[in-house]
């Protein structure tokens, strides 16, 4: 079994985590500077930024978004339908990224989705 190694830049167990780990992208070894968020945290941020309206329900899909950062480093933002970003979630996320053979720049939405209700 391969050891999973990462650096937690924020405390785990909340609705978001900032981590860094080494992996592969386009056949190159890179550093992933990663933000992992719950879909609930994404929903609240969208409300705060007024990108969505609280008077309508909204459905959000899990996603990963890759952007170049510095040479040999990429920014990775991942939204997951989980209650919190704990260590098992971080491990599963790293495994998913390391096993995904066709990673590309940009955003990829994938299932499952979650519908958030109207806030009164």
Image: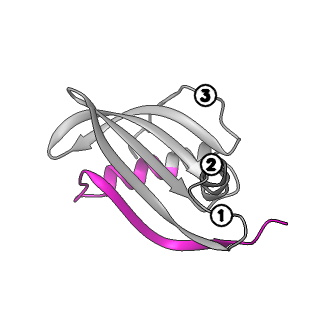
Mark 3 nearby-residue class (10 Å; few <14, some 14–19, many ≥20)? few
Q: Earlier in the sequence, mark 1 or mark 2?
A: 2
The residue pinned by badge 1 equals 53
Residue 57 lies, with reference to residue 3, above or below; the image says: below
Residue 54 lies in quadrant: bottom right
- The residues colored magenta run 92-120
Q: Residue under circle 3?
A: 10
Q: Residue at x 30, y 58 (%)?
A: 100
Tell me, yes or no, whether the highlighted magenta stretch contains residue 116. Answer: yes
- Give the left or right position of residue 97, taking residue 83 as reference: left
The quarter of the rendered structure image containing the C terminus is bottom right
Measure the C-alpha gap from mark 3 to mark 2.
18 Å
Of residues 31 and 74, the one nearer the viewer is 74
Q: Of all residues shown, which one is farthest toward the left?
A: 27
Secondary structure beneath dot 3 equals: loop
Contact, mark 3 vs mark 2 (Cβ under 8 Å): no
């Amino acid at each position: 079994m391969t050891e999973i190694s990462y650096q937690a830049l924020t405390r785990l167990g909340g609705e978001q985590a900032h981590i860094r780990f080494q992996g592969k992208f386009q056949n190159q070894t890179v550093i992933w500077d990663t933000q992992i968020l719950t879909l609930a945290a994404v929903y609240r941020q969208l409300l705060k930024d007024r990108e969505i309206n609280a008077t309508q329900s909204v459905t959000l899909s899990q996603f990963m978004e890759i952007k170049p950062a510095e040479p040999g480093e990429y920014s990775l933002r991942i939204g997951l339908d989980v209650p919190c970003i704990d260590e098992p979630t971080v491990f599963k996320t790293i495994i998913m990224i390391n096993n995904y053979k066709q990673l590309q720049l940009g955003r990829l939405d994938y299932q499952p989705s979650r519908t958030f209700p109207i806030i009164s």
